[in-house]
Image (cartoon, rainbow, N blue to C red):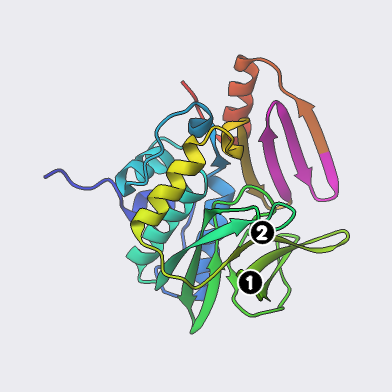
């Protein structure tokens, strides 16, 4: 049998990680930061109606070997495999994304819980919006800042736990999840729905996002936004050639 593609050294090079292999909160933080700052969140294959595989070697080939990105099921599946290989206890969970409420939202997002230094941490390298830059300590109500973003975990009487993001008007939910154990088939089903349902958000427009030390770079449906501290620059990108060049220049994504 051929050797498997997945290996930690190639992944570390991909995210520019040069730290050690100690199972610690600091290692977890540096891995998380390295991932979101070097592997972009993107839906380009979903938009092109291509198959989205969750096979580990397929994920590794796409995101590490081919320098592409992915969306939540791809990104967090790869990150969970890395953490497991390094010895971090990690569990995967399905979450409901907040759309003006949770009652009209299915469980279409994957989020991780990892253990380090005797504590649980929410890890999520695959959310394109007000995403986590670094792991979030699972301590209810504790406001935590990373790269200028402030998040917290709050209990929800109906939906388990909410991850919230601070805006100019206060905290807003991003998604909610429970401790419920999910089987691999649950993610296959959720991934299939998210990638193929005609009205899925990810089928409507091309999108790509990458966290930076001072903000975030986002491409959405012909509009490029660069948030650099308090400065926001927006540029319209028109035409296939210009879009491909922008994706290559700002996100390192090369499309055929």
Q: Mark 2 and mark 1 in contact (Cβ < 8 Å)?
A: yes
- Which secondary structure type mostly characterizes the magenta part of the structure? strand
Residue 190 in view (yes/no) = yes
Q: Mark 2 points at which residue?
A: 102
Residue found at the very far front of the displayed protein:
103
| Residue 69 appears in view | no
- Which image quarter: residue 225? top right
Residue 146 position within the rendered picture, expressed as x and y whole percent measured from the top left: 69, 64
For the record, the magenta segment spans 215-232
Q: Which residue is drawn at 54% across and 30% down?
A: 47
In this rendering, the answer to whether 213 lies above or below 220 is below
Which badge, 1 or 2, comes first in the chain's sequence?
Answer: 2
Left or right: residue 93 versus residue 173 is: left
- SS at mark 2 in the image: loop
Residue at position x 73%, y 50% in the image: 215
x, y percentage for residue 44? 53, 32
**In x, y percent, where is residue 250?**
63, 34
Residue 203: image location, x then y, percent: 57, 32
Specify few, some or many for label 1: CA neighbours under 10 Å numbering under 14, 14-19, or 20 or more: few
Query: Judging from the image, what secondary structure is the residue with disc 1 in?
Result: loop
Nearest the viewer among 173 and 125 is 173
Q: Is residue 106 above or below residue 140?
A: above
Marks 1 and 2, how far apart at CA = 10 Å
The residue most toward the left is 1
Q: Nearer the viewer, residue 127 or 28?
A: 127
Neighbour tally class for label 2: few under 14, some 14-19, many 20 plus, Cα within 10 Å:
some
Horizontal arrangement in the rendering, residue 121 relative to residue 141 (left or right): left
Picture quarter with the N terminus? top left
Tell whether 40 sits left or right of 68.
right
Residue picked out by circle 1? 158
Q: Extreme bottom residue here?
A: 118
- Residue 22 belongs to the span the image colors magenta: no
């Amino acid at each position: 049998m051929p050797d498997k593609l997945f290996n930690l050294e190639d992944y570390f090079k991909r995210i520019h990680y040069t730290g050690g292999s100690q199972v610690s909160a600091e290692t977890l933080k540096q891995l998380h930061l390295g991932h979101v700052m070097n592997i972009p969140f993107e839906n380009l294959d979903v938009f092109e109606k291509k198959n989205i595989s969750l096979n580990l070697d397929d994920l590794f080939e796409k995101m590490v070997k081919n320098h592409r990105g992915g969306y939540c099921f791809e990104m967090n599946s790869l990150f969970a495999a890395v953490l497991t290989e390094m010895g971090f206890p990690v569990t995967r969970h399905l979450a409901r994304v907040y759309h003006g409420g949770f009652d009209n939202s299915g469980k279409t997002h994957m989020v991780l819980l990892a253990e380090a230094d005797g504590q649980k941490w929410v890890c999520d390298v695959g959310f394109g919006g007000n995403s986590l830059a670094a792991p979030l300590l699972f301590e209810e109500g504790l406001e935590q800042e990373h790269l200028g973003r402030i998040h917290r975990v709050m209990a929800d009487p109906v939906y388990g736990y909410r991850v919230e993001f601070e805006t100019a008007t206060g905290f807003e939910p991003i998604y909610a999840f429970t401790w419920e154990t999910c089987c691999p088939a649950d993610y296959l089903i959720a991934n299939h729905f998210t990638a193929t349902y005609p009205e899925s958000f990810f089928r409507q427009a091309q999108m790509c996002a990458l966290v930076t030390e001072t903000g975030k770079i986002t491409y959405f449906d012909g509009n490029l936004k660069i948030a650099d501290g308090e400065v926001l620059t927006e540029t319209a990108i028109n035409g296939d050639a210009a879009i491909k060049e922008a994706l290559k220049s700002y996100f390192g994504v090369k499309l055929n």
